[in-house]
Amino acid sequence: MAEPAPIGGESYGEIRRAVRRLCARFPGEYWRDLDRARGYPEDFVTALSEAGFLAALIPEDYGGSGLPLSAAAAILEEIHRSGGNGAACHAQIYVMGALLRHGSTAQKEHWLPEIAAGRLRLQAFGVSEPDSGSDTLSLKTTARRDGKDYVIDGQKIWTSRAAQSDLMLLLARTTARERVVKKGEGLSLFLVDLRAATQGTSPSVVIRPIRTMINHSTTEVFFDGLRVPAENRIGEEGKGFRYVLDGMNAERILIAAECVGDARWFIAKARDYAATRQVFGRPIGQNQGVQFPIARAYAQCEAADLMVRRAAELFESGAACGPAANTAKLLAAEASWAAAEACLQTHGGFGFAEDFDVERKFRETRLYQVAPVSTNLILAYLAEHVLGLPRSY
Ligand SMILES: Cc1cc2nc3c(=O)[nH]c(=O)nc-3n(C[C@H](O)[C@H](O)[C@H](O)COP(=O)(O)OP(=O)(O)OC[C@H]3O[C@@H](n4cnc5c(N)ncnc54)[C@H](O)[C@@H]3O)c2cc1C
């Protein structure tokens, strides 16, 4: 059989090859062992950080590489396409975007070089709360001004990597919801230093891990009278939600790129198995019932990839990219899920065996139907904001 052509595009070829070389040092066995122990891939994250990949979007003036969003998308796609999981560190690439776009010069000069060098980790983003996931604006964590500080009380949930972060970007309410004119107002954004706050006998921040069906280092975080200097507020008081929205588009595009990477991993894995597994004296890949789901997933993945590139292009040009970023996320998450399903089915019983990595990646890619934004909420956004239909909630 002729060697099949490589699946997928090759923009940023040099970066992609460098990421692939790095990922080759962290094979399936590495991720499997961590998955069983629900361990954090410290060595992998350190290697990415030392290679400069996590500082891709930080401007050169602050010690980063100053690359566009599409380059970061290529990095994350390659991690997933190699069988790894960028969720351990993807937020280090994009959470700093709020600081970069809306922080003061003094804040940027203080924090960004340390983040770019990997000496500080800013990879926790505290938005979701137990009673406000999709309905972000109903969040209850408060930040009350007291002299030169704000005092933070409340609880976040699903704050991923909080235990592996020095800093957290936190969205909290500074004006009660009943007292604001527009419901997106009254929320403010803070850069919270977790290092001292989590120490001592009665810490003002307590982080508790949540064990989930995937290895994601996600946590719940409790704030009890945490004092944050007012100089750590990003931008103006009350405008935090607007600042967060910019970053959410970047996050959606990058997560969509991870989904494209997952889809490509599943498709290649399914193709290789279908081509070699002999049943009834011939390769199972000779049956259309086996070929077609893989071929369909391939087509879905290629279309999603184009949408990711289009959304990244719009983001980079500074144009409005909400519809494109949401569409990219929706299509890419659907493509990765279709590819995961085709891959698992192609493997028959072996799809369930840990050593094949299919079941692990299958669990991991399922997340993207729910987080960072669920499929239904994307559809509701497109229906309302693009199609002009009445708001459904
Ligand atoms: C592993 C993991 C990691 C995460 N990491 C982070 C993180 O780092 N930081 C952070 O802030 N958050 C994080 N999240 C939270 C994530 O963003 C939320 O889970 C997500 O936004 C959905 O919110 P929810 O879980 O409260 O679901 P809900 O809002 O309770 O929704 C439940 C279901 O109902 C549907 N639904 C709700 N309202 C409507 C409607 N009006 N129309 C149609 N359908 C609707 C939703 O689509 C969903 O399927 C993470 C979640 C997980 C599972």
Image: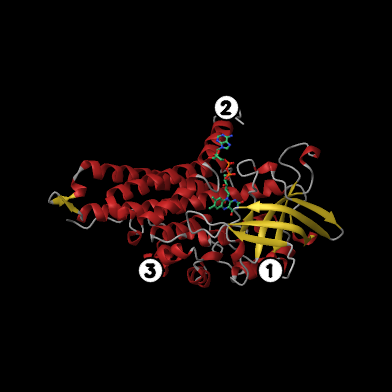
Q: Which residue is mark 1?
A: 195
Mark 1 and mark 3: Cα distance apart in space: 33 Å
Q: How many marks?
A: 3
Question: Which quadrant would the C terminus be assigned to in this image?
Answer: top right
Secondary structure at numbered mark 1: helix
Q: Which residue is mark 3?
A: 24
Q: Residues within 10 Å of mark 2 (few under 14, many from 20)?
A: few
* In this picture, residue 363 sits left or right of residue 7: right
Q: Secondary structure at mark 2?
A: loop
Could you tell me which residue is drawn at 33 percent across and 62 percent down?
A: 355
- Marking on residue 389: 2
Q: Indicate yes or no: mark 2 CB to ligand 1 under 8 Å.
A: no
Q: Position of residue 152 (x, y in %)?
A: 76, 56
Circle 3 — which element?
helix
Residue contact between numbered discs 1 and 2, judged by CB atoms under 8 Å? no
The three-letter amino acid code for the residue at tag 1 is Arg
Taking the image as four quarters, which one is ligand 1 found in?
Answer: top right
Q: Residue at x 58, y 70 (%)?
A: 118
Residue 4 shows in this picture: yes
Task: Categorize mark 1 by other alpha carbons within 10 Å: few (<14), some (14-19), many (20+).
Answer: few
Q: Amino acid at mark 3?
A: Ala
